[in-house]
């Protein structure tokens, strides 16, 4: 593979970060501070061997956040980091059901997440939306409750309904009802699929959940007909290269399917997924996509536009981002 030489400054490329789970956006030093406040050892963030081990570590990270002051610090720092990386829009994956003990109800927890993220976004000049996340492993009834809370807050910071956690044994079709509730309210359907399970999970996300975007979806490359459908419908994949490597979805970044997906006409964005557990933030994952996956600056610019245009970000954010992306790709300035 011919890896393109770095040219333009990736920090200056306006970009959206669409696949980012809030708790895992915590800075490592902040995680250590929170653990000291709680009086426990700093939760580990390395050493998982598989997805199950990864989920356990995610739970450890989340366990030290359960205080409103700590949550506010996490949100503010995550927005500051997004701004520093050149993100102009962030769509946080949030799990309000995990904060019921703190805030009293799913709805109240979601309202507080919306307030904190909006305030931090305004401070740091980054637009923000919330992807309210359904946990596949917690059952249908809770999923419906979460979807109803999200649907009732459409237009007030909530923009999408996600579906996360273990794909294996928890098929998307089991969650058709909550996603129908979300879609009826005007929210985007943004489930995880095509990560731990093959193309059949992406088909199911399209057919049962009427997905507007697919989080991950890289295993779509195994089914040429699916690739054709994704390209024809313009369904984007919110791809996380480093996450795919560390969770053994791919064995080598040089063989990542992202270039092939783009070449086939599938729209893709680039994302960090869980920075505290995988390492890179959004800027570094763009750099990895350039250096190790082999994307050209033209492809990176296309991914950046996909990360803005395919969302419910405000129209003025989209226009400013498009102008900035066009200016970036039109520049011949070499990054230092």
Image (cartoon, helix red, strand yellow):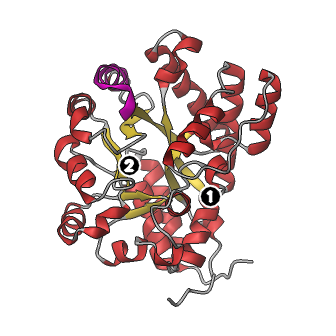
Question: Does residue 127 show up?
Answer: no
Q: Is residue 10 left or right of residue 227?
A: right
- Residue at 57% x, 76% y is 292
Question: SS for tag 1?
Answer: loop
Q: Position of residue 297 (x, y in %)?
A: 52, 78
Q: CA distance from mark 2 to mark 1?
A: 17 Å
Q: Which residue is mark 2?
A: 311
**Residue nearest the viewer, comparing 229 with 153:** 229
The vertical placement of 321 against 65, above or below, is: below
Assign the C terminus to one quadrant of the image. bottom right
Residue at 56 percent of width and 12 percent of height: 101
In the foreground, 265 or 330? 265
| Residue interval drawn in magenta | 135-150
Judge the density around disc 2: few (<14), some (14-19), many (≥20) Cα neighbours within 10 Å.
many
| Circle number at residue 190 | none
Q: Is residue 279 above or below residue 138?
A: below
Point out residue 321 in the picture as x, y percentages from the top left corner: 49, 58
Identify the element where label 2 is drawn: loop
Q: Residues within 10 Å of mark 1 (few under 14, many from 20)?
A: some
- Extreme residue in the bottom direction: 2
Q: Is residue 84 above or below residue 245?
A: above
- Examine the structure image and report whether residue 127 is included in the region drawn in magenta: no
Tell me residue 197's x, y (percent): 33, 54
Q: Residue at x 43, y 70 (%)?
A: 302
Which residue of the protein is positioned furthest toward the top in this rendering? 104
The residue beneath circle 1 is 86
Residue 241 can be seen, yes or no: yes
- Mark 2 and mark 1 lie on one chain; the one further toward the N terminus is 1
In the rendered image, residue 206, in percent from the top left (x then y), is placed at: 21, 50
- State left or right for residue 329 relative to residue 185: right
């Amino acid at each position: 593979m011919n890896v393109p030489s770095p040219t333009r400054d990736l920090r200056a490329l306006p970009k959206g970060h669409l696949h980012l789970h809030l708790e895992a956006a915590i800075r490592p030093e902040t995680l250590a501070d929170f653990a000291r406040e709680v009086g426990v050892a700093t939760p580990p963030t390395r050493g998982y061997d598989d997805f199950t081990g990864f989920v356990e570590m995610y739970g450890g990270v989340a366990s030290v956040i359960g205080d409103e002051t700590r949550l506010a610090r996490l949100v503010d720092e995550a927005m500051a980091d997004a701004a520093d990386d050149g993100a102009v829009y962030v769509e946080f994956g949030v799990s309000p059901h995990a904060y019921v003990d703190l805030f009293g109800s799913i709805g109240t927890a979601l309202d507080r997440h919306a307030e904190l993220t909006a305030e931090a976004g305004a401070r740091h000049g980054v637009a923000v939306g919330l992807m309210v996340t359904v946990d596949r492993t917690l059952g249908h009834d809770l999923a419906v409750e979460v979807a109803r809370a999200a649907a009732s807050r459409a237009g007030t910071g909530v923009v999408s309904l996600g579906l996360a956690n273990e794909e294996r044994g928890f098929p998307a079709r089991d969650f058709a009802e909550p996603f129908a509730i979300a879609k009826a309210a005007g929210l985007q359907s943004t489930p995880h699929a095509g990560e731990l399970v093959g193309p059949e999970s992406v088909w199911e996300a399209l057919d049962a959940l009427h997905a507007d975007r697919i989080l991950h979806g890289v295993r779509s490359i195994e089914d040429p007909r699916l690739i054709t459908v994704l390209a024809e419908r313009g369904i984007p994949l919110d791809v996380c290269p480093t996450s795919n490597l560390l969770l053994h979805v791919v064995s080598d970044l040089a063989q990542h399917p992202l270039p092939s997906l783009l070449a086939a006409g599938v729209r893709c964005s680039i994302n960090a997924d869980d920075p505290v557990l995988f390492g890179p933030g959004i800027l570094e994952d763009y750099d990895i996509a350039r250096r190790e996956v082999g994307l050209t600056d033209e492809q990176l610019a296309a991914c950046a536009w996909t990360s803005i245009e395919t969302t419910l970000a405000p129209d003025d954010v989209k226009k400013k981002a498009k102008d900035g992306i066009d200016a970036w790709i039109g520049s011949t300035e070499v990054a230092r």
